[in-house]
Image (cartoon, grey):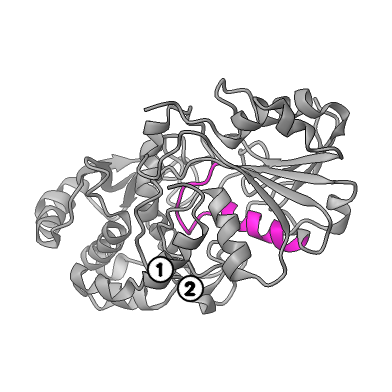
Amino acid sequence: MKKVLTGLDVLKGDNKLVSEFKGNVALLCHNASVDANCQHATFVFQNLFKNRFVKIFGPQHGFSTDAQDNMIETDHTIHPFFNIPVYSLYSETRTPSDEMLEGIDHLFVDMQDVGCRMYTYIYTLTLLLEKCAEKSIEVIILDRPNPLNGETIAGNILDMSFSSFIGRHPMPVRHAMTMGEVAQMHQKFWVTSKANVRVIKMKNWQRSMYFGDTKIPWLLPSPNLARTESVFTFPSTVLFEGTELSEGRGTTQPLEIIGSPKIEPFSFYHGYLSEAIKKSKLKGFVARPIAFLPTFQKHYDKVCGGIQIHVTDRKLFEPWRTGLFLLKEFRSYLGDDFKWKQPPYEYNCTQMPIDIINGTDKLRNWVENNESVAALNSFEHLDEYKRQLQEIKLYE
């Protein structure tokens, strides 16, 4: 397979395309916004646009991608090297203000998504599009791969009564879209006021590709996704943010491991979980008993017992189903020691965090009622979403 060129690489290599942008330029980006040589997009923009590069925006976790967890906000600042403003879109606001957008003609977006509904960068994008629909600003998405591939669609569609900043639109857990396609879907089906949007497409990307197939360097898009392995388990383990169990934050393998101080890992796995996994008929992964010590966040400085999820076959692995199955089994094993996390979560002070994450309260009921994995079929109503996706696809 040929190396994939991201939208940033395509822009950088096309002087005629660069010349189409006449006015002042801003860039929404983060740590993973790099070209094929790992040069950060801000340096590319300084070279391309000189003093017309006037503002930087950062999403959740900050422009530097160093802020942990949800509801940890970052400040606005002046960049010490470029000497231009850096505005945080995870601060007192998630939507850019009129003042932030003043003096911008072209606002570029270059962010690496992880292909899962419960990840905020796509909502930073759609809030930006909604704000720019009121303006004459052109929004240009420099497209990047969906690391989970652009074919596999899975999970329940968000119930809009549970909408939040980790779920703003009626989409499934694995949405199979690139950032550019999210923008296309948003403009066609989710809003009435249209923005001036352009997508600079990738070259050589195929929908069947996982991230490792692209030959693009992986840099963490958020502090707890340093490894591509974590991206594949993320749709499973993100569910545990809605519980008092640790999902491995504060360790070197966050979002791949799950556990509690109340669990002895070998007894849990060999005496209980391994047999439950066999009965579930879920494939494409193995669970390994593990003890770990979080250095921050949940169960700080307490040894936790649990499992690490090892994906053995990405095509067979079903992270949404596996995560819900594991949630049910941890709850069943722990009994009264299992606790759901209580509000607030992502600025929602009334609804249960697990329901916000799932985009429904029905899946919490599925867990509490100890229902079968086969019963999850009744939650996937994907035909309409698949029809919509066919209409906006940028890549075949």
Instruction: Report the span colored magenta.
Output: 112-131
Can residue 165 be seen from the camera position used here? no
Q: Residue at x 31, y 58 (%)?
A: 323
Q: Is residue 302 left or right of residue 317?
A: right
* Residue situated in front as seen by the camera: 13 or 260: 13
* Residue situated in front as seen by the camera: 3 or 89: 3
- Answer whether residue 328 is magenta in the image: no
Q: Residue at x 27, y 47 (%)?
A: 305
Q: Which residue is mark 1?
A: 340
Q: Which residue is mark 2?
A: 352
Q: Is residue 372 left or right of residue 350?
A: left
Q: Residue at x 67, y 27 (%)?
A: 14
Can residue 108 be seen from the camera position used here? yes
SS at mark 2?
loop
Asked if the residues shown at circle 1 and circle 2 are in contact, with their CB atoms under 8 angstroms apart, the answer is: yes
- Which residue appears farthest toward the front when viewing the image? 16
Q: Is residue 329 left or right of residue 189?
A: left
Crowd around label 1: few <14 · some 14–19 · many ≥20 (10 Å): some
What type is the residue that disc 2 sits on? Met
* Residue situated in front as seen by the camera: 81 or 152: 152
SS at mark 1?
loop
